[in-house]
Image (cartoon, rainbow, N blue to C red):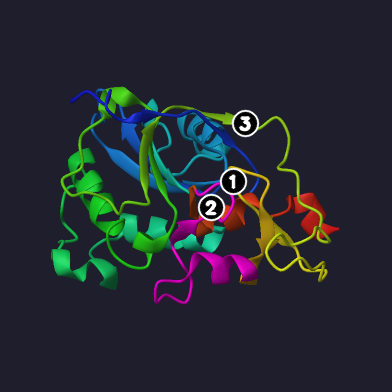
Amino acid sequence: MASCSDIEECESEIEEHFYGVYLLYCTNPKYLGRTYVGFTVNPLRRVKQHNRGSQFGGARRTSNKGPWDMVLIVHGFPNDVAALRFEWAWQHPWRSRRLAHLGISKSARRTMTFCLSVVNEMLRVGPWRRLPLTLRWLQPKYYAPLKNPLPDHMKIVKGSLRKADQPHEALAASEECRECGRKSGLKTLRCLYCSFSAHAACWLRRIGSKGLVIPIDGTCPSCKKNVMWGRLVIANRPPKSAQDS
């Protein structure tokens, strides 16, 4: 396999609101090369379940065929519905209307090369091309360069995932908007890189939508760094405990 030394190395935490779609590769000599695509909110726990078997929560298709390596994971989805739709299309590319132009046959062998070519195209077409997604190589030894470049706002990184020590701290709903100067009772969104915070509507007016109803990215008025709209919203989402209260 090719080296991935030119890819950003970035270890990330599995926080609340983590939604990922992963690719497994079987290393059992009897089933060597088999793949499996799945959805998870906790990759560390999920790969253990697959390797322990269906009686421990693993999938029936992977049960008693391991060991399995979790090769890569696509994460950054805004919710579980978006991730599950992505999972379904990756599992059934011949049935997805978004991928009809590829002319994929149901009988195509689901090798790792095939799975990579499918996900490469998925990340380049709508609606997924507009999401702030990251393709993370969890095991660099499997790295293979993608045939086609991804949208500029998407990341390709290598590195492990670890459980977050504590949930993301929600911002106060009454925090003053740095753009309009009002405390309207609406929650503000704080920049990922600095202390600038503003109402969602004020952010949208500031960064501009470039003709889109929902923007992909824009420049923070304070630190001037590029901010992905999807990551901004997800990072400022309150923890589940606060949502349920």
**Secondary structure mostly taken by the magenta-highlighted segment of the chain:** loop
Comparing labels 3 and 1, the label whose residue is closer to the camera: 1
Q: Which residue is mark 1?
A: 192
For the residue pair 26 and 236, the one nearer the viewer reads as 236
On the image, numbered disc 3 is attached to which residue?
163
Residue 1 picture location, percent across and down? 18, 25
Position of residue 76 in the picture relative to residue 1 (left or right): right
Is 206 a magenta residue? yes
Which residue does the image show at 59% across and 51% down from the upper left? 222
- Please tell me which residue is depicted at 72% across the width and 40% down the height of the picture: 167
Q: Secondary structure at mark 1?
A: loop
The residue segment tinted magenta is 202-224
* Residue at numbered disc 2: 231
- Label 2 SS: helix
Check disc 1 and give the amino acid type. Answer: Leu
Mark 2 and mark 3 residues within 8 Å of each other at the beta carbon: no
Which residue sits at x=33%, y=67%? 126
- 12 or 58, which is in the foreground? 12
Q: Earlier in the sequence, mark 1 or mark 2?
A: 1
* Residue positioned 49% across, 28% down in the render: 11
